[in-house]
Image: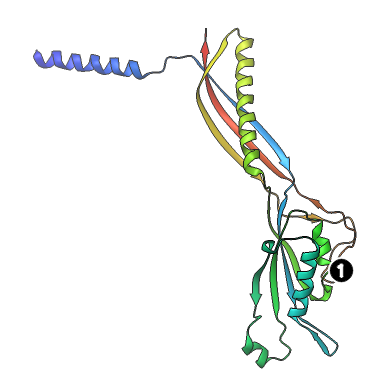
Amino acid sequence: MKKAILLMAFIAFTAFTYAQNVDLRRKIEVSGTAEQEVTPDIINVSISLQEYVDGKNKVTIDQLENQLENAVKNAGIAKEDFTINNLSAYNNTYQKKKNPDFLASKQYLIRLSDLNKYNQIINGVDPKGIQSTNIESYDYSKIDELKNELKLKALIAAKQKANLLLTGIGEKLGDPISITEIDNGSAMPAPRVMFRAAAMSTNSVPQDSDIDFKKIKLSFQINAVFEIVK
């Protein structure tokens, strides 16, 4: 008998505790989104230079590098934004001794804030010495600030949606119960530079090209749960 009473008391206590933990508030769950496109203002461009033979004369990597350094300086690029990215047997003495026709190459990385300076730099270098160029990566300098703005806009959109729905059925919006952030990330298209003039080749760079750069699209979603009050 005593055991039965204790068991009943335990069951009653468990049921009471469970009832205390159940959220009986009336709620509405909605989502809000915000997105925006921005033009990248940080572009990392690689330029690879290679020695070449012009008749009996050899245009060395040092000559080409000097041209590139001057072109970068004239374009107003800071020294810290111009670095050597890779060496291709530049200091390989064995290769040079073994093969007199060996052509050394060096790759440089230039950080640009204005992609239009790209043409200015390229046009300052002997085109025969340009082995290749490529856009390595790009970003937006104020991306963190923009992300915070979009998150706030998404939250406001969620609240407005909840208020609109409740007003339509004669209910009132209460305080938020939970807010969940969903980062949809940024739609980062493959780097692409478009020229209005003739297409660029290794030995031909447009003098007056109009460059258009793909934009970055940022999108954020907020899921929010609000209380419905009387």
| Figure colour scheme | rainbow
- For the residue pair 113 and 158, the one nearer the viewer reads as 113
Residue at 52% in and 31% down: 180
**Rendering coords of residue 99 (x, y %):** 69, 91
Vertical position of residue 97 compared to residue 200: above or below: below
Kind of element beneath mark 1:
loop
Residue at 57% in and 10% down: 172
Number of numbered markers: 1
Q: Quadrant of residue 152?
A: top right
Q: Quadrant of residue 181?
A: top right
**Rendering coords of residue 51 (x, y %):** 76, 80
Q: Quadrant of residue 196?
A: bottom right
- Please state if 187 lies on the left or on the right of 18 as rendered: right
**Rendering coords of residue 164 (x, y %):** 64, 15
Q: Which residue is mark 1?
A: 204
- Please state if 147 lies on the left or on the right of 114 as rendered: left
Query: As shown in the figure, which amino acid type bears the numbered disc 1?
Result: Ser
**Which residue is situated farthest in the left direction here?**
1
Residue at 69% in and 68% down: 108
Q: Quadrant of the N terminus?
A: top left
**Rendering coords of residue 8 (x, y %):** 19, 14
Vertical position of residue 183 compared to residue 189: above or below: above
Residue at 64% in and 10% down: 168
Say few, some or many: other residues with alpha carbon within 10 Å of mark 1 (under 14 / 14 to 19 / 20 or more): some
